[in-house]
């Protein structure tokens, strides 16, 4: 296992915890040493969950390694069953306990508990968190549907399952609300939502639906593939993140139901209009670097390029299991995908691409801050601030609205800081200038005030020979209400430095000069 200062994914048993915590009536007995219980904090602190994960640890210590750790595990399983009375149980080992090879599955089976006990074999030194979540969900679905016959679906209303939302998932709770509402408008019944909120018995009803919506392929892709093979269920693989993807998702559902799309389906969608507005066109062509889990990275690159008009200069993911999909998406933007979980490699790639905006995880947020680049978090791993108390989805039409704000606000704030820096020495914009709403008398310092004496009077700038056409075009990108100030300051800088023809470089040299 690679030990790093930062890690994009935890070991696979963390993924198993995410499934157990998302579901109801499931208990996870984890053979783990003392100290591995840190994982509880991921849910109670970062996700702000109101209860601890349904996990029992054996918490063996170093002195226990010389005795019978197998008996310790069996006692933990027995005690967990007696205390919690779960409907089903999953058992496994953490990365450290994997080394002592106690066979948690065999030990639990020998107890003969009167509930389903699903053994997990999650190789911690080859696989990671999302794979562990997908494998756990797959084994639970397979165990629940093992003796279920293929149902007859004809003559019944069309229904679907929503698969993938889990605990500690990036905006999963809010996405689920949006997708549920969208399906209601499309007249489709929801059969089962899993793993989030589902019980083990609910999983046995999954085959009754006509199709499975794979909301997050990293978690539900394996289970959906199994259900398609065994029960012939269709898979809705379009992830409805972004305006265009949501439209395609709705079209797939309409094809399933053979119903036309409602006329008011997009009544709450405002992002398309915003993307055509004057404020937004200023952002056209901005260079963006996208990195995250595969689903969010692919979706956000498409939103950035096709819906807002950014130029995607970097696209990558730490999800090695989905490297093919990420590489195919990167080819659409004529770039090479970055598949890595080494944050130093990703930092070097961002620095080399010189983007004007980074869309990534909380780790790219730190990288972008060091590089002085605006950033928005669009994928796990996340921090507590990425689990907002308010409703803030990424999926559906409301999610498209949220995405527009998420992608444009960092650049808008960057523009504001750029202007404040450029005009920091201006008599109207300097740090000590009085607010204009206080009136002319308060706003204009007297000749004897310390403010006035600290700001030298700016002489009228002699006009330079001229402006290059490209520099004039660049100047027009600055909002009209400060464009005159920008022109005057640039010409003043040019005069002081003997520049006779202003170029784009002169504009940015002037900006750097006045920002000091």
Image: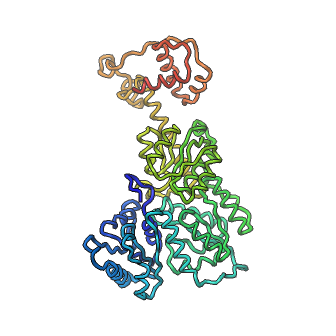
Q: Where is residue 183, by image quadrant?
A: bottom right
Tell me, yes or no, if residue 273 can be seen here: no
Colour scheme in the image? rainbow
The image quadrant where one finds the N terminus is bottom left
In the rendering, at what x and y percent does residue 222 appear?
Answer: 57, 68
| Residue at screen point 64% across, 60% down | 238
In the rendering, at what x and y percent does residue 511 appear?
Answer: 47, 25
The image quadrant where one finds the C terminus is top left
Residue found at the very far left of the displayed protein:
63
In the rendering, at what x and y percent does residue 156 appear?
Answer: 70, 78
In the figure, is residue 408 to the left or right of 436?
A: right
Q: Nearer the viewer, residue 353 or 191?
A: 353
Q: Nearer the viewer, residue 332 or 310?
A: 332
Q: Nearer the viewer, residue 337 or 178?
A: 337
Tell me, yes or no, if residue 357 can be seen here: yes
Q: Where is residue 207, by image quadrant?
A: bottom right
Q: Nearer the viewer, residue 3 or 516?
A: 3
Q: Where is residue 442, by image quadrant?
A: top left
| Residue at screen point 54% across, 62% down | 218
The total of numbered circles placed on residues is: 0
In the figure, is residue 67 to the left or right of 438?
A: left
169 relative to 312, above or below: below
């Amino acid at each position: 296992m690679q030990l790093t200062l930062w890690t994009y994914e935890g070991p696979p048993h963390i993924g198993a915890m995410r499934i157990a915590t998302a579901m109801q009536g499931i208990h996870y007995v984890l053979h783990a040493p003392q100290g591995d219980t840190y994982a509880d904090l991921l849910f109670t602190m970062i996700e702000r969950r109101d209860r601890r994960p349904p996990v029992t640890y054996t918490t063996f210590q170093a002195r226990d390694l010389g005795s019978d750790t197998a008996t310790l595990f069996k006692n933990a399983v027995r005690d967990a069953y007696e205390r919690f009375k779960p409907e089903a149980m999953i058992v496994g080992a953490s990365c450290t306990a994997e080394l002592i090879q106690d066979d948690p599955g065999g030990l639990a089976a020998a107890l003969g508990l009167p509930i389903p006990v699903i053994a997990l074999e999650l190789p911690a030194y080859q696989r990671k968190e999302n794979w562990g979540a997908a494998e756990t969900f797959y084994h639970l679905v397979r165990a629940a549907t093992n003796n279920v016959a293929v149902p007859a679906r004809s003559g019944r209303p069309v229904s679907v399952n929503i698969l993938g939302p889990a605990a500690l998932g990036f905006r999963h709770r809010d996405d689920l609300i949006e997708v549920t509402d969208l399906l209601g408008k499309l007249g489709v019944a929801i059969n089962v939502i899993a793993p989030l909120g589902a019980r083990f018995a609910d999983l046995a009803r999954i085959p009754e639906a006509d199709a499975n919506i794979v909301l997050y392929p990293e978690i539900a892709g394996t289970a959906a593939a199994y259900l398609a093979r065994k029960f012939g269920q269709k898979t809705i693989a379009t992830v409805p993140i972004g305006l265009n993807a949501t439209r395609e998702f709705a079209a797939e559902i309409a094809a399933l139901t053979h119903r036309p799309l409602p006329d008011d389906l997009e009544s709450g969608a405002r992002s398309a209009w915003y993307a055509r507005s004057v404020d937004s066109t200023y952002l056209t062509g901005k260079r963006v670097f996208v990195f995250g889990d595969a689903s969010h990275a692919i979706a956000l690159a498409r939103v950035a390029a096709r819906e807002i008009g950014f130029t995607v200069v970097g696209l990558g993911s730490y999800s090695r299991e989905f490297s093919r999909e990420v590489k195919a998406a990167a080819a659409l933007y004529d770039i090479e995908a970055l598949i890595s979980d080494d944050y130093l490699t990703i930092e070097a790639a961002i620095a080399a691409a010189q983007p004007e905006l980074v869309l990534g995880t909380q780790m790219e947020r730190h990288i972008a801050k060091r590089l002085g680049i605006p950033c928005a978090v669009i994928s796990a791993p996340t921090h507590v601030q990425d689990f907002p108390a308010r409703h803030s989805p990424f999926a559906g039409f409301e999610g498209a609205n949220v995405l527009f704000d998420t992608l444009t606000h960092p650049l808008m704030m960057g523009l504001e800081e750029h202007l404040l820096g450029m005009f920091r020495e201006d008599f109207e914009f300097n740090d000590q200038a009085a607010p204009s709403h206080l009136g002319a008398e308060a706003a204009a310092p007297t000749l004897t005030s310390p403010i006035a004496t600290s700001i030298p009077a700016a002489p009228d700038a002699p006009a330079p020979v001229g402006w290059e056409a490209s520099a004039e075009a660049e100047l027009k990108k600055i909002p009209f209400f400060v464009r005159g100030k920008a022109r005057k300051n640039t010409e003043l800088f040019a005069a002081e430095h003997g520049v006779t023809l202003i170029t784009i470089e002169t504009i940015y040299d002037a900006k750097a000069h006045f920002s000091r």
